[in-house]
Image: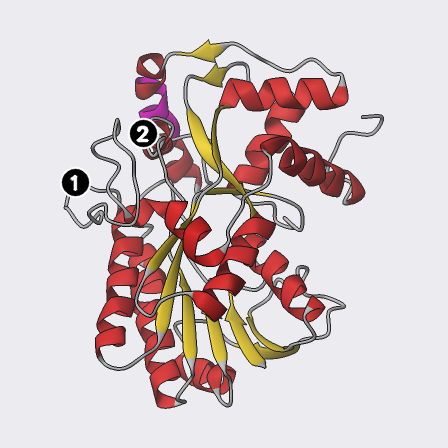
């Protein structure tokens, strides 16, 4: 089976491309500059990006399946319109390339953030309304609009399914990702205190497995939530302490105490042109998307996320092999 991937050099993409190679597939990946995640792998590369339509035509030509993972993640805002350009316009370009080259199936990676977090006290599944309101964060809205474009393309004849992962951890996190950096910072006690909140954490390898199952068994036009397990950030610190016998910070600062500093940090980061560790958007995320159901993915695809302890151990051991843990740890 001939398969193409956008975003193969990202965190989930790195796990997905390795799983595909393990299946003996012919894999073509879209690449820009950072090739660490695919160096040494038996893949064909196409130079370009999702805003370059000609490169997408080359990428998808002769392919049976396309997995679209390329994304612009932001906890700061629209970033000069690039969030919308990549997550909506780029998705539209991938769709048009798939239609033109008659790709048999598109597996589109959206996000849990495509769904509204309200009401926060009820179970969130694939029937939750999308985050399309003006009051929703730019990233959330862009992911909702992106998967809306996929749904429109299904009406035009494209066979597509949509995966909605939660907060991703796991090995092969070369950059590292924002969630991977959170894990490293907790391990190294770089936070003076933790924040009173948590995430639904999922292993990148389980997201990849969910996507591969959706390619084969997913119903055309459907969403599948690839969630894992909700844990407070203090629980993550506790698990790290239990796994490695090291002290980790357990004090959780109330959210309300963090709101003003978050706005100040965001303003300062924008002035310096850097990405802050926490922002008002990140604070709200820590209070959202707690009750997430992957029942549909389990029932239809056989999806079973692994225990969080296994994910944390494997992730930190991979970071160790990459020299990202302090010497002597």
- Give the extent of the magenta segment: 260-265
- Mark 1 surroundings within 10 Å by alpha-carbon count, few (fewer than 14), some (14 through 19), many (20 or more): few
Residue 135 disc label: 1
- Tell me if residue 42 comes above or below residue 249 in the rendering: below
Residue 155 disc label: none
Residue under label 2, please give it. 284
Residue 143: percent from left, percent from top: 31, 54
- Mark 2 surroundings within 10 Å by alpha-carbon count, few (fewer than 14), some (14 through 19), many (20 or more): some
Left or right of 308? Residue 88 is: left
Q: Residue furthest left?
A: 134
Q: How is the image coloured?
A: secondary structure
Left or right of 124? Residue 134 is: left
Q: Residue at x 26, y 42 (%)?
A: 137
Residue 179: percent from left, percent from top: 53, 38
- Tell me if residue 141 comes above or below residue 152 in the rendering: above
Say whether disc 1 or disc 2 marks the residue closer to the N-terminus: 1
Near-viewer residue (209 or 152): 209
Check if residue 240 falls in the magenta segment.
no
**Secondary structure of the residue carrying numbered label 1:** loop
Residue 218 in view (yes/no): yes
Residue 68 in view (yes/no): no
């Amino acid at each position: 089976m001939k398969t193409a991937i956008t975003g193969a050099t990202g965190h989930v993409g790195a796990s997905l491309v390795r799983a595909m190679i393990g299946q003996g597939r012919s894999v073509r990946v879209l690449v820009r500059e950072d090739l660490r995640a695919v160096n040494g792998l038996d893949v064909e590369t196409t130079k370009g990006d999702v805003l370059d339509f000609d490169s997408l035509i080359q990428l998808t030509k002769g392919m049976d399946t396309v997995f679209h993972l390329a994304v612009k993640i932001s906890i700061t805002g629209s970033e000069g319109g690039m969030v919308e350009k990549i997550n909506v316009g780029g998705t539209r370009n991938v769709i048009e390339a798939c239609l033109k080259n008659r790709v048999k199936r598109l597996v589109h990676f959206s996000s849990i953030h495509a769904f509204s977090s309200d009401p926060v006290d009820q179970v969130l599944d694939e029937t939750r309304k999308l985050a399309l309101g003006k009051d929703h964060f730019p990233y959330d809205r862009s992911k909702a609009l992106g998967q809306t474009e996929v749904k429109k393309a299904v009406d035009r004849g494209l066979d597509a399914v949509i995966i909605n992962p939660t907060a991703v951890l796991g090995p092969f996190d070369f950059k590292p990702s924002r969630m991977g950096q959170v894990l490293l910072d907790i391990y190294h006690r770089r936070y003076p205190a933790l924040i009173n909140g948590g995430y639904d954490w999922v292993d990148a390898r389980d997201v990849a497995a969910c996507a591969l199952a959706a390619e084969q068994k997913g119903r055309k036009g459907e969403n599948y939530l690839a969630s894992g397990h909700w844990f407070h950030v203090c629980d993550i610190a506790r698990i790290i302490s239990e796994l490695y016998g090291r002290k980790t910070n357990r004090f959780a600062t109330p959210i309300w105490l963090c709101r003003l500093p978050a706005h100040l940090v965001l303003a300062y980061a924008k002035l310096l042109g850097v990405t802050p560790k926490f922002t008002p958007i990140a604070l709200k995320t820590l209070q959202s998307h707690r009750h997430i159901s992957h029942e549909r993915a389990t029932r239809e695809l056989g999806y079973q996320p692994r225990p969080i302890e296994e994910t944390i151990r494997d992730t930190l051991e991979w970071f160790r092999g990459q020299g990202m843990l302090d010497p002597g740890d």
